[in-house]
Image: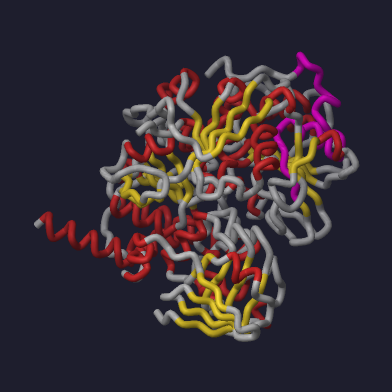
Amino acid sequence: MTDRFLGKAWVYGDNVDTDVIIPARYLSTSDPAELAPHCLEDLDPGFMERMAPGDILVAGSNFGCGSSREHAPLAIKGAGVSCVIAASFARIFFRNALNIGLPILECPEAVKGIRSGQRIEVNLAEGRILNLDTGEVFSATPFPPFLRELVARGGLVPTVKARLEEKRRNAR
Amino acid sequence: MARTLAEALIASRTEDHVEPGAICRVRVDFAFANDITGAPAIAEFARMGAETVFDPARCAIVPDHFTPNKDIASARQVQAAREFARKQGMLFWEVGRAGVEHAFLPEKGLILPGEVILGADSHTCTGGALGAFATGVGSTDLAAAWALGETWFRVPETIRVVAEGKTSPWVTGKDLVLSLIGRIGVEGARYAALQFEGQAIEALPMDDRFTVANMAVDAGAKVGLFIPDARTLGYANKRAARPFEPVFPDPGAKYAQTVRMYASRLEPVVALPHLPSNVKPAGECAHIDLDQVFIGSCTNGRLRDLELAAAVLKGRKVHERVRLVVIPATAEVFAEALKRGFIETFLEAGAAISTATCGPCLGGHYGILAPGERCLSTSNRNFVGRMGHTGSEVLLCGPLVAAASAVAGRVADPREFLGLDEVPKGGEEE
C-alpha cells in the first residue's frame, strides 16, 4: 500500500453516518465494485460522477457514526477515495477502516484548514497533511503503537492468519 | 485498583493490564452476525485461512434484517449464511422461529451477565442491559473473533449516568435514553463506556433497560452497562443457555465523568430529524403531522413496548391518514402478545402487523417512505434516508408516544389519552 496521496478535497460536516455513506437499500451485496457507484449517494448525489480516483474525503467530527456496516469503508475504498481525514471517527468505523485497509487520519486542524476543491497531499506514514493551495501543513494525531503495528502487518486479516498458523504449528 | 463495570468485565476476560486507554486482548463468550454483516464476515473468515469457528455453540448468525427475504439478492445472502452456519455447526434460526437479534439472543439466554459479547451490528450494546460487555464491530473483526475466540479492545473511559428520583408513569426507557442523548449529544460518549445507575435506573423493567442500553451507541458509546441486580439475575437465570458469573464495579472506581439526570423532570419526548440528539417534549410537537408510525425494532419491539402501545390503542382507531406498522421483535414476543390480546387490539385499531424483522427501521422493507413522507418510529436512528427516500423524515420516540400519535395523526403526548392509573405497570413478572 502506497502511503503518499495527492487528491482533491471533498469537505463535509459533522456526524456523516454510514446510512448516507452507503444506504441500506444497497446492502444485498458486499462487493466493493457494486457498492462504490452508490458511495455518499444520500449525502451528496452525483459525488461519484464528479470525484476522481485518489480524491480525499474531509469531514468534521464523528465520521462514520451509526450502523456497523463494513460496507461503508468498502464503498469509500471501492470508489477510489485515497484517504479520509476527519476531526474524529466513530469507533466502529475507525476499526473497520483499519481492518479493510482504508487510510484514515484524525486531524481537527486540517479539517478547519481545508476547503472543498483544494488540492491535498497526504503522507500517511508521517501523518502529514499538506494543503497545496494554501501551503498550510497539518499533523494528524498518531495512532497508538498497537494500531500502527496492526496496519504495518497489513491489517487484521494477515494478523489472524499468522496467529492461526502459529496455533496449528504448536498443535502439531 | 478499583474498577468500573467496563474495566471489571474486560479484566475478567484478559491477562493484560486493564486501565483506560490500554489495549487488551480479550476472550469472547459469544460472537454473532446478521444476514447483512454475515456475508462479508464469512468471506473474511476464509481469507484468514480459518477453517472452523472457535466454538460452534458460541457463534451465531441471526437472519433478521432483510428477512423474510425481500428479494433474490437478500435470499442469496441468507442462503450463504445458512450454508456456512450448517457447515460450522453453529447457531442459526429460520424465519418464524427467530427475531431481531438484540431482542432474540437475550431471550434465548445467549447473552448473559459478566460476559464479553461481540456482534457485527452496532446495536449489540443492547446486551449491556444484562451487565455484559456487549459491543458492535464490523464484519472483519467479527470474523477474527469467530476464528480465534478473542478480540482486542482499547479499555474505554467510563461515564457514569446517575438517574435519581422517580419517573412519571408516562416516561419509558426510550424517553430516558433520548433525553440523555439530547443532553450529551450523538458523540457525547464517543469511545467511552456508559454505566447507568440510580433509583430511576433500578426501577426500570428489563425491557426498558434493553431500550436504554440499545441506544448507547447512538451517543457514540462502546457499551451501555447496567449493574446486575435481582431483576437482571431473575431474567438471566430463567433463560441462561450456559453457566455465567455476574461482574460488578468496585466501590471507589474512577469515572471520567458523571452525568446526573433528575427522573421526575423527564417527559415523553421525540427526536426530530435528522439526529437522535434533536430531542423535544412530545407535547411541544403537536403541530407535526404524520404519515406512518412504526412500533418495533431492537429498541422497542419487546413485550413491554407492545403492552404500553396496546394500552393506548385499546378501543381506539389509528387516524385515517396514518399507517401504523407493528412488528413484534421476536416470535416469542409475538406469541405472548397474541395471548394477552395486544395483537387483537392492534388489528382492531387498524394496524398492519408483521412477523419479526428489522424491516423498515433501516429502510429494508415493510414500510419504506416516499419523498415528503414522515414517520414516527420507536427505532433508533432518524438519519437522512434511514427509512426510505432522502426526502422523507423520521422522528424517534417510545411506544406510548408512538401509539398516541398514531391515533392523533400527529405527534401526541400520551397524557392526551392515558390517565395516571391507566398506564400498565411493568416489571412485576420478571
Q: Quadrant of residue B422?
A: top right
Task: Quarter of the image for the N terminus of chain B: give it.
Answer: top left
Residue B103 shows in the view: no
User: Range of the magenta residues?
Assistant: B394-422
Q: Position of residue B276 (x, y in %)?
A: 69, 46
Q: Nearer the viewer, residue B365 or A43?
A: A43
Picture coordinates of residue B90, whole percent (x, y): 34, 46
Residue B270, horizontal then vertical, whole percent: 76, 40
Is residue A10 among the parts visible in the rendering? yes
Q: Residue furthest right?
A: B287
Q: Is residue A149 left or right of residue B361?
A: left
Between residue B256 and residue A65, name the one nearer to us.
B256
Is residue B390 found inside the magenta-colored segment of the image? no
Where A119 falls versus B38 (above or below)? below
Taking the view exactly as shown, the residue that stands out farthest to the front is: A136
For the point 40% across and 56% down, which residue is it? B141
In the image, is residue B413 part of the stretch drawn in magenta?
Answer: yes
Residue sticking out furthest to the left:
A172
With B397 as the anchor, is A27 left or right in this view?
left
Point out residue B188 in the picture as x, y percentages from the top left corner: 61, 46
Total labels: the figure holds 0
Nearer to us in this view, B363 or B178: B178
Determine the image quadrant of residue A144. bottom left
Q: Quadrant of residue B307?
A: top right
Tell me which residue sits at (49%, 54%) in the image.
Answer: B35
Q: Name the residue rendered at 65%, 83% in the picture.
A: A134
In the figure, is residue B103 to the left or right of B275? Answer: left
